Amino acid sequence: MHDRYHATILTLHQPPGNLEDLLLHDTWKAKEIMYALDRIPRAIWGYEDIARIHLAISGSLLETLTSQDFQSQTYGYVKCGDLLWNLRNPAIDLLATGYYHPVFPLIPPADREEHILRWFGIARHLFDQEHFQGMWPPEMGFCMEMIPMLKKLGFRYVLVDSEQVVPLTPMSWHEVRYRPHIASFGGEDIIVVVRDRELSNSQEAGMDAGWFIHEIFERTQHCDFVPLVTTASDGSNGGWFRNTKWDANFWGVFYRPLMRRMREGTAGFSPIFIQDYLDRFGAEGYVIVRTGAWNTGEHNGVGFMQWTGSQMQKDALERVDKMSRGIHELRWEEGKKGWPDPEAGRLLEEAMWRLLKSETSCHFFWGEDWVPRVHVDLDRAASLVEQARKKLDT
């Protein structure tokens, strides 16, 4: 077996207002992040014929990059407009994701679609692309109940973590990891593409091309099918991605040397977009995907302990759920009436944005440090709902 393929995924996210705050209080860190983002399309210039990178960019980060005020603050070291334009590269494919980067299984089901639809809105505008085949669930937070929604929104495949995949069809260890499968729920099927957790950890922490080539050979040498090895990690956090020296970061130490090996024909595998692999080789076998997330260093993703480990985190999520029910019920009632009061509709739409913003995964990720931010957004949402109710009662 000689044909092997590799899909690289990088996720890019900054919570609302974070880059702006860093510019004021930790300017060098903000510059490191911006340089890391700007470096991505530049690093693959000259390798467009062979490089293949999937990017999942949160809506909140895209919103920041398109802000004229933010662009004026970063002009001189990164031109945000050029960065966004350079991402329109044939070697880059965008994966859809949630606008505010929520952990989908932890938020109300009705809000999941709202996040994705809002992401569609900004991504379609910026990248002139109508359809997105792949879905990246933020933090790889996935549950089977999401499948009908994902199919409704037109997705062909979704990324899942290798530690959460349980085969229903008999298959070997390497078949579970290195072949796309089918997951079913509620009468709907979707292709699941499996992220190799160990190799993804190395992608995030640091590795060289020679080691990676050897690992792929060792892990796939007994495959009696054409394997797809998928690695996915954060693409702008940590010294490995933020280091401004090319001889000490992901692109200079690993990716560009790997592309040179590809050109020489000595890598033993080829980069590929996931949809191109699926077009050629399809998916095989049925699996279930356990509800969970990817590993976060301290936790393995099972039980979402990173985001739900304290009572304060749980209480905030409970308040999110309550606020969501109230907003959706009121929107539903007014929608049935044909939205007779445009101002009330505007207030409810703004309340929905505030609710979704409260669900940002970062608000829950950092223990209890950022949980108060949840309540700031929910307080604002509650105020907007109250204003809408008063308008409707008059």
Image (tube, grey):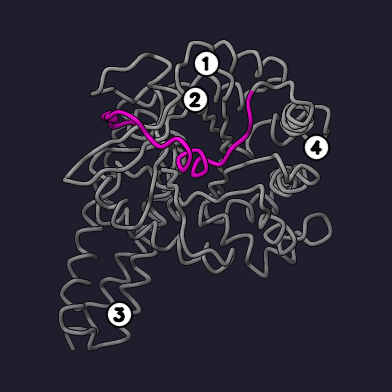
Reading the chain from its start, which is encountered first: label 2 or label 4?
2
Q: Is residue 294 visible?
A: yes
Three-letter code, disc 3? Gly
Q: Are marks 2 and 4 in contact (CB under 8 Å)?
A: no
Q: Which mark is residue 220?
A: 1
Disc 2 crowd, CA 10 A, few/some/many (<14, 14-19, 20+): many
Q: Which mark is residue 345?
A: 3
Q: Which mark is residue 244?
A: 4
Reading the chain from its start, which is encountered first: label 3 or label 1?
1
Residue 231 on image: x %, y %: 54, 29
Three-letter code, disc 4? Thr
Closest to the observer, 145 or 370? 145
Q: Residue at x 34, y 45 (%)?
A: 104
| Separation (CA) of disc 3 from disc 1 | 55 Å
Three-letter code, disc 1? Thr
Three-letter code, disc 2? Pro
Residue 380 on image: x %, y %: 37, 64
Q: Nearer the viewer, mark 3 or mark 2?
A: 2
Q: Are marks 1 and 2 in contact (CB under 8 Å)?
A: yes
| Separation (CA) of disc 3 from disc 2 | 50 Å
Reading the chain from its start, which is encountered first: label 1 or label 2?
1
From this view, report whether residue 78 is shown above or below residue 190.
below
Residue range in magenta is: 269-292
Residue 383 falls left or right of residue 196: left
Reading the chain from its start, which is encountered first: label 3 or label 2?
2
Disc 3 crowd, CA 10 A, few/some/many (<14, 14-19, 20+): many
Closest to the observer, 103 or 260? 260
